[in-house]
Image (tube, rainbow, N blue to C red):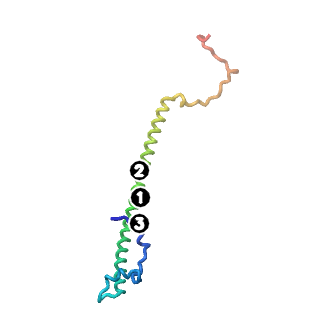
Amino acid sequence: MNRLVTDPNLEQCPNFSSAMFQACRTPLLNHTTDDAQAADTLRDFWLATNAALKVQWQVQLDADALEAADQQHLLDEATDQRLQTQKAQDAILTKEDRKKNCIHLIPIPDRLRPKWAMDEVLVADFAL
């Protein structure tokens, strides 16, 4: 099925009784059909074709919306996958960093500073 480029809902039925369409009406003329009936026949053909194009246009819009939703779903899945992979890599790097630099992660105790001038310092015998 060919893809429609323009919306058939915006098209207006041409005036088939005008002189511009005389060449289109001429093959339809005979002893039982006059100019007005030929113009009505052309208008009926145009309306039927336009109605079919309107249905095709709506199907095309629905297919486009469905494909856009599918693309968005795939994009969301890819983004979630990428974020999960990034979180896993960050967790592994953090764990390895803790193993390598464990001395940096030792908590500093919250104690008062010693007052060396006032406290007696005990020196071990082997240090003398």
Which sits in the foreground, 121 or 94?
94
Picture quarter with the C terminus: top right
Residue 75 in the figure: left or right of residue 101: left
* Residue bearing mark 3: 5
Any mark on residue 68, and which? 1
Q: Residue visible at 40% across and 52% down?
A: 74
The three-letter code of the residue at mark 3 reads: Val
The x and y percentages for residue 21 are 39, 80
Amino acid at dot 1: Ala
SS for callout 1: helix
Residue placed furthest toward the front:
23
Q: Is residue 10 left or right of residue 110?
A: left
* Structural distance between the alpha carbons of marks 1 and 3: 18 Å
Query: Taking 84 as reference, is 102 above or below it?
Result: above
- Residue that extends furthest to the bottom in the rendered view of this protein: 31
Residue position marked by numbered label 2 in the rendering: 77
- In front of the other: label 2 or label 3? 3
In this image, 72 relative to 34: left or right?
Answer: right
Q: Name the one closer to the observer, 108 or 43.
A: 43
Disc 3 crowd rating (10 Å Cα; few below 14, some 14-19, many 20+) is few
Specify the quadrant of the image occupied by residue 40: bottom left
Residue neighbourhood size for the residue with mark 1, other residues' Cα within 10 Å, grouped as few (<14), some (14–19), many (≥20): few
- Mark 3 or mark 1, which is nearer the start of the sequence? 3
Q: Quadrant of the N terminus?
A: bottom left
The earlier-in-sequence mark between 1 and 2 is 1
Q: How would you rate the neighbour count of disc 2 (Cα within 10 Å): few for under 14, some for 14-19, many for 20 or more?
A: few
Element assignment for label 2: helix
